Image (cartoon, rainbow, N blue to C red):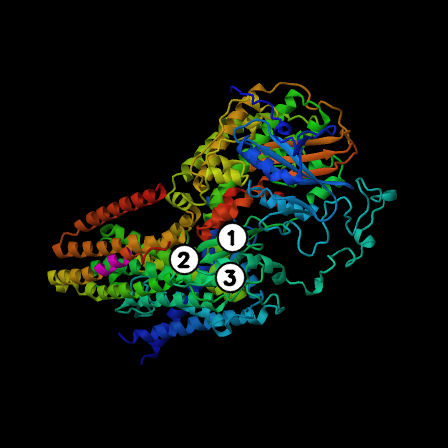
Amino acid sequence: MLLEYVAIAILIALATFIALAAVLMGELFGPKRRTAVKAEPYESGMRPIGPGTRRMPVRFYLIAMLFILFDIEVVFLLPWAVAFRQLGVFGLVEMLIFIAILLVGYFYAWRKGALEWE
Amino acid sequence: MATVTAPALDLAARFPQAVRPDTRPGYSGWIVEKDHLLEVATALRDEFGYDLLSSVTGVDYYPDTMEVVYHAYKTTGGPGIVFKVQVPRQDPIEVPSVTPIWAGAEFQEREAWDLLGIRFVGHPDLRRILTWEGFAGHPLRKDWKEPFYEEEAKPYKSRWPDGKFFYAEEKNPFKDNLKFPPDFNPEDWTPDKADALLYASLARYLKSDDELKTDRVIINLGPQHPSTHGVFRAVAVLDGETVVALKPVVGYLHRNHEKIGERNTFLQNMPFTDRLDYFNSMSNNWAYALAVEKLMGIQVPERAEYLRVIMAELSRIQNHLILIGMLLNDLGAYFTPSLYAFEERELILDIFEAASGSRMMCNYHRFGGVVRDIPPEALQKLKGLVYDRLPRKVDEFDRLLTENEILVSRLKGVGKLSAEDAIRYSITGPVLRACGVPYDVRRAEPYGIYDRFDFDVAVRYNGDVYDWYLIRLDEIRQSLRILDQAIRQMPEGPVMSTKPQYQVRVPPGEAYGRIEAPKGELGFYVVSNGKPNPWRYHVRAPSFVNITALEKMCVGNKIADFVVILGAIDIVLGELDR
Amino acid sequence: MDYALLIEWTLKSLILLLVLLGGFAYLTLYERKALARIQVRIGPNRAGPWGILQPVADGIKLIFKEEFTPASADKLLFFLAPLITVVPALVIAAVVPWGPPVEIFGRRVTLQVADLNVGVLYVMAIASISVYGIVLAGWASNNKYAMLGGMRSSAQMISYELALGLAFVTAILLADSMQLSEIVAAQRNVWFVVLQPVGAAIFLIATLAEVNRAPFDMPEAEQELTAGYHTEYSGMKFALFFMAEYDKMIVVSALAASLFFGGYWGPGVERFPWLGPVYMAIKVIILLFGMIWVRATLPRIRYDRLMSLGWKVLFPLALAVAFITALGILLEQLWLVPLLSLLAAFLTSLLVTRAIWRKVYA
């Protein structure tokens, strides 16, 4: 079964090759007329004020943290789903308890306004 | 409608020290002493009920006087009041700003400062608005001459001498055709320097009082931006995605319409008005014709009056359809609604083409009528549109869009404006009516033959973008009602009361012609001194005045809402930048 | 090590890539034509008969455009970002079974590049990688629009990944396997969309968000962010982002078809296995039309509402649906599954509508 990953490695190599070739082709055939103004970042035709990359609103980080929490939950669900028919009632109850614990956190976050984007 | 005639307003009796009537022949209104302006204006607003300041502009009576002209109206209807402030024409020309009383004067006063050099004392942000920093002088002053100056009035004698033309560049070699202010060096000019003042005025919004300190960002939306409906620019301060402050920057399409208009003859200005709001040339023509007809004191034949109404209402319908379509585009609906709207618009433009010979730049009105009658086939087509197709299509739009959850949730509560604020900011047109003020020039001070028609002034009360959208649908329906009556009642007869002529004789005086254009109140203030071309030709453009309140509407909303609000105000840059 | 196997894999990879590249090119044409028809227009019809050479013309144009890097950009990341975006988009398709195993020259060949036993996990893992490409593109451009677009995009994609993962769980539960070939094989008699319509709907909605298509095309919201994360990109680098988006559309349609719409199954596939890819293609084309149709019809949801939808609606609903499925399997009453999940979906939509109108008319 592990051998199948060789096929994927081949695919990745080919895909990377195609992508690189495309960019290279553009570099090769495209014109190159650089000017200082052209090299400025685009901001509706005005010179930007301040850097483009800067501290973003904290909400983005909050979403990222919540995502990690709940994505792990989803990943746990995957093997559970595969083995579900063997586990039976035990599996369902076990998983319900696990999810219930996480849901407490979910509702806490909701109440705290972590899911609000206002 | 029972009209209660108010006792004749005698300002001179109320302010014997400060006000005297304007007795120049052909003029009306009051002349207010500069030092008493604020006092009189406050009284006008609070005691006499002139709460809507329609237009503020200046006239340069070279060489002695500079005059600032104010037109104020009551939102309850009825004729307005004109009052003027005269100051000696010596720099610095200073007049108190009326922005504390009517906030809507802000941009108009900036415009008067920019073009005429009248300094409004007490104005919060008196910068140039339509021209740029590197512009020398104030172009609407009569002693201002452009570097390529030829003559005071058109038609220029130099054009086609002996049937030969020459290129303007031959007379004005490149680099000599520009003038800069004395302390201005174009070589080291950068946009950063120019915008320093603007950014400085926004600097205080950059500090967040939030405990979780996020960077607030100044971001430019426009001039090269896909959704600002032209070369419009807004500088916004963002906290995350929320707009904290916003300043519109206009003038990228400025061509000094008014100066060109003063050089043109009266009739030459007629096609020129087409280029203001290029979606509604029919309405623009009408407003200008009204002003000049007032000066000339001529009547319009019956059939022409009906044709004017028909064209203006058709124009309103197509304008509102486009607005709804493009509003949906601003919401991110990929072109489907707007293309559906364009389909109907094309059919309306067919009528315009049949009547005037042109689809967009119609140039249809003349002083004393319209240029030619509508052909019978076009009238037949028009009937098909008004009685069958358009009502059906409007209902279809209504059915498709109005209840759409995404649309509702994106428009409800966005850009909310109270009725008081809307009046204070001199907002007119559908936006004002959607804020709960039933003010429509067609009813408030009927022009043409609007007093004959049975229609309702559409009003909505929430003042958010959803209502701005709904009111457009309402207005289309009312326009269809008017069209229905107009087509039925239209008599046969001539369409011009005067002989067609290239040069009209306009007696000296002033006139303000205003109509309810699809985008709001469109006014033309024309001053004649008896010569073939106007002494002053001012356009009170609804897009320009309505944009004054843009910041008020946007603050607190999301950056995505800014696009929607801007789209729903309904601006056209041809008219905004003039 | 079997050389024949290596050759088979290489050939299959090449064919898959060619199909995806050609599919990308003609998907753009398909979309433009379909949109045009919906919008009472004709659409591209100049390059070749019925405009069929339009994608070629577009491609050639993009090759001859200037490749352009802003001076203040992070050069390396700016170069890598389109690659990081496009490679996963191409590679996800490795596990999709395009048809039942067939005999070629006496060899039994599966019509998928790799039949992994953790196929679903593979899809989720690879799909997550392309988020990096988009975030890096936004970051490396050193442009405010791009940055905002990139951040929005990443937040959106990870938020919808939860619902997407749970939709996968329902399919896994029903098929009792993570292997895509077995999931498809399990739908021989009844498609999972019948058993789990709500799961399928959640999957389709979440994939729209995953591939940044309307009405979730927030990261490239033209109206406010000009072009979002790829504002600064031009020429072929831009084309790669474009290709990634459209290839992902094809791939998620293929995945949706495999997970819920019976994959390659259709009348006559048992006797003629080569009909499998044809059915698959038809299903993918229909699902793609759905995406195009949605784009032509719906306005964009505002960003905060989008996040609310993902976190407060789709995630709990998907969780509930997963457990309803598990319950149905446990009780061996499969008819309960669609019934209860539709009930849950109905209740949710009721609550959402109420919340929207309450908020709106507050």
Query: Which residues lie in the magenta part?
Result: A103-110
Whether residue C127 appears in magenta in the rendering, the answer is no
Q: Amino acid at mark 3?
A: Thr
Amino acid type of the residue tagged 1 in the rendering: Leu
B419 vs C84: above or below: above
Mark 1 — on which chain does it sit? B
Q: Quadrant of the N terminus of chain C?
A: bottom left
Q: Are marks 2 and 3 in contact (CB under 8 Å)?
A: no
Secondary structure beneath dot 1 equals strand
Residue located at (32% from left, 65% from top): A65
Q: Could you tell me what secondary structure mostly forms the magenta stretch? A: helix
Q: Quadrant of the C terminus of chain C?
A: top left
Q: Which residue is mark 2?
A: C212
Per the rendering, the mark at residue B99 is: none
| Cα distance in 3D space between marks 1 and 3 | 23 Å
Mark nearest the camera among 2 and 1 is 1
* Subunit of label 3: C
On the image, the x and y values in percent for residue A84 come to 16, 63
Residue marked by disc 3:
C231
Check the image and report above or below for B187 versus B431: below
Left or right position of B294 against B2: right
